[in-house]
């Protein structure tokens, strides 16, 4: 092997380097390093109050759900390759039972950063149990939204209400448009 081959940057190395940098940027402002359950719970309370105030249709969903995963602040950033990070809590009957982090990586034409909150409503016991049993649950394209990524409320119809998991994405700030949860991975953490 020549001396130049060992110093050459590989495509894989470059990609992982960019992903790491995007993840570090995405983590900014999320209180990384301040693993404090009281801080997460306070942010969850504030996020739920804001959601109920701005989108009253979510009050009924919360009452009908078997549990809610509340992510008060997710920061997403990217330049060709992007990432997102946030922390939140799973609440059952209004009580925090577990804490979770969320991460997301993506590639493609993108530039900018944004922050948003989201709530997953588990509408069936099976959906909630499946989420809690998994070691790393990922949101799929089949997720039904009750608050669209542009911040507009969607009316819950009979089709939406039969979905096992519903999502509300709101409180967006930043230079990117169109927050989506597809590909977002949730992992249980100990604050």
Image (cartoon, rainbow, N blue to C red):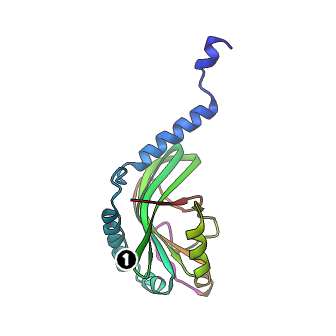
> Picture quarter containing residue 182?
bottom right
189, 64: nearer the viewer: 189
Specify the quadrant that holds the C terminus: bottom left
Is 91 situated left or right of 31 in this image? right
**Spot occupied by residue 63 in the image (x, y as percentages of width and height):** 45, 86
Residue found at the far top of this picture: 2
Q: Residue at x 35, y 50 (%)?
A: 33
- Say if 182 sits above or below 52 in the image: above
- Say if 129 sits above or below 19 in the image: below
Q: Residue at x 34, y 53 (%)?
A: 31
Specify the quadrant that holds the N terminus: top right
**Spot occupied by residue 91 in the image (x, y as percentages of width and height):** 44, 75
Please give the residue where the numbered disc 1 appears in the rendered image.
Answer: 54
Main SS category, magenta section: loop
Is 61 situated left or right of 43 in this image? right
Residue found at the far right of this picture: 1
Give the SS element for disc 1.
helix
- Say if 60 sits above or below 142 in the image: below
**Spot occupied by residue 148 in the image (x, y as percentages of width and height):** 51, 70
Number of marks: 1
115, 133: nearer the viewer: 133
The residue stretch that appears in magenta: 148-157
Count neighbours of disc 1 (C-alpha within 10 A) and say few if under 14, some if 14 to 19, many if 20 or more.
some
158, 120: nearer the viewer: 120
Q: Residue at x 55, y 50 (%)?
A: 105
**Spot occupied by residue 37 in the image (x, y as percentages of width and height):** 34, 63
38, 103: nearer the viewer: 38
Report if residue 126 lies within the magenta region.
no
């Amino acid at each position: 092997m020549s001396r130049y081959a060992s110093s050459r940057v590989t495509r894989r190395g470059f990609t992982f380097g960019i992903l790491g940098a995007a993840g570090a940027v995405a983590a900014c402002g999320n209180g990384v390093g301040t693993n404090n359950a009281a801080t997460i719970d306070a942010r969850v309370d504030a996020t739920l109050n804001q959601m109920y105030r701005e989108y009253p249709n979510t009050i009924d969903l919360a009452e009908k759900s078997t549990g809610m995963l509340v992510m008060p602040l997710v920061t997403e950033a990217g330049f060709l390759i992007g990432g997102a990070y946030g922390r939140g809590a799973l609440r059952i009957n209004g009580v925090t039972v577990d804490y979770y982090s969320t991460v997301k990586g993506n590639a493609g034409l993108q530039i900018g950063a944004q922050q948003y909150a989201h709530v997953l409503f588990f509408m069936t016991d099976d959906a909630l149990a499946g989420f809690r049993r998994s070691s790393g649950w990922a949101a799929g394209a089949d997720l039904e939204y009750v608050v669209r990524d542009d911040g507009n409320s969607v009316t819950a119809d009979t089709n939406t209400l039969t979905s096992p998991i519903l999502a509300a994405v709101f409180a967006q700030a930043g230079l990117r448009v169109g927050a989506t949860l597809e590909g977002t991975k949730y992992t249980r953490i100990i604050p």
